Image: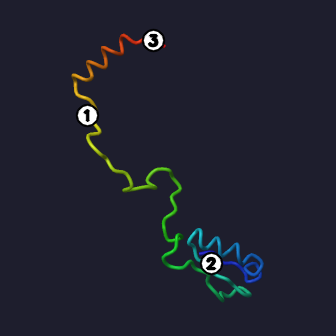
């Protein structure tokens, strides 16, 4: 929890409110060193969701596996047919 003096809060009020919403952290406002107010994000807002700082794990449960991801997509007879036809193609 961060603390800031009332004068600084007055000068940067809108920016501080945006920061509280974005980060989800509480800021305590002091006057002559004594806490007088607290700015906290509202419940049910975007700020309550964890901010992912990594590209890994930011979309859990959004993908779906359809079919067998280990086996071949064509059966063996089709594979042989494709292999034989590809040998007759000119190479690049």
Residue 79 position, x and y percent, is 27, 22
- Asked which secondary structure carries label 2, the reply is strand
Mark number, residue 71: 1
In the image, which is nearer the foreground, mark 1 or mark 3? 3
Secondary structure at numbered mark 1: loop
Whole-percent x, y for residue 64 in the image: 33, 50
The tag on residue 1 is none
Question: Do callouts 1 and 3 mark residues in contact (Cβ within 8 Å)?
Answer: no
- Badge 1 vs badge 2, beta-carbon distance below 8 Å: no
Q: How far across and how far down the image is residue 18, in percent?
A: 65, 72
Residue displayed at 68% across by 74% down: 16
Q: Quadrant of residue 47?
A: bottom right
Circle 2 is placed at which residue position? 27
Q: Earlier in the sequence, mark 2 or mark 3?
A: 2
Q: Position of residue 53 (x, y in %)?
A: 53, 56
Disc 3 element: loop
- Density class for disc 2 (Cα within 10 Å; few <14, some 14-19, many ≥20) is many
**Image point (58%, 68%), residue name:** 23
Cα–Cα span, label 1 and label 2: 55 Å
Give the CA separation, mark 2 to mark 3: 67 Å
- Residue at image location 45% in from the left, 12% down from the top: 91
Q: Which of marks 1 and 2 is in front?
A: 1
Give me the C-alpha separation between circle 1 and circle 3.
Answer: 28 Å
User: Which residue is at a point 27% across and 18% down the rendered structure image?
Assistant: 81
Q: Which colour scheme is used?
A: rainbow
**Which badge, 1 or 3, comes first in the chain's sequence?**
1
Nearest to the observer: residue 7 or residue 87: 87
**Looking at the figure, which quarter contains the N terminus?**
bottom right
Name the side, left or right, on which 40 lies relative to 10: left
Q: Mark 3 points at which residue?
A: 91
């Amino acid at each position: 929890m961060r603390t800031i003096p009332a004068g600084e809060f007055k000068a940067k009020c809108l920016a501080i409110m945006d920061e509280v919403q974005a980060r989800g952290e509480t800021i305590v406002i002091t006057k002559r060193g004594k806490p007088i107010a607290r700015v906290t994000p509202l419940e049910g807002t975007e700020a309550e969701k964890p901010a992912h700082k990594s590209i890994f794990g930011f979309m859990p449960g959004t993908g779906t596996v359809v079919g067998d991801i280990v086996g071949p997509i064509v059966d063996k007879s089709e594979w042989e047919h494709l292999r034989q036809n590809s040998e007759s193609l000119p190479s690049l």
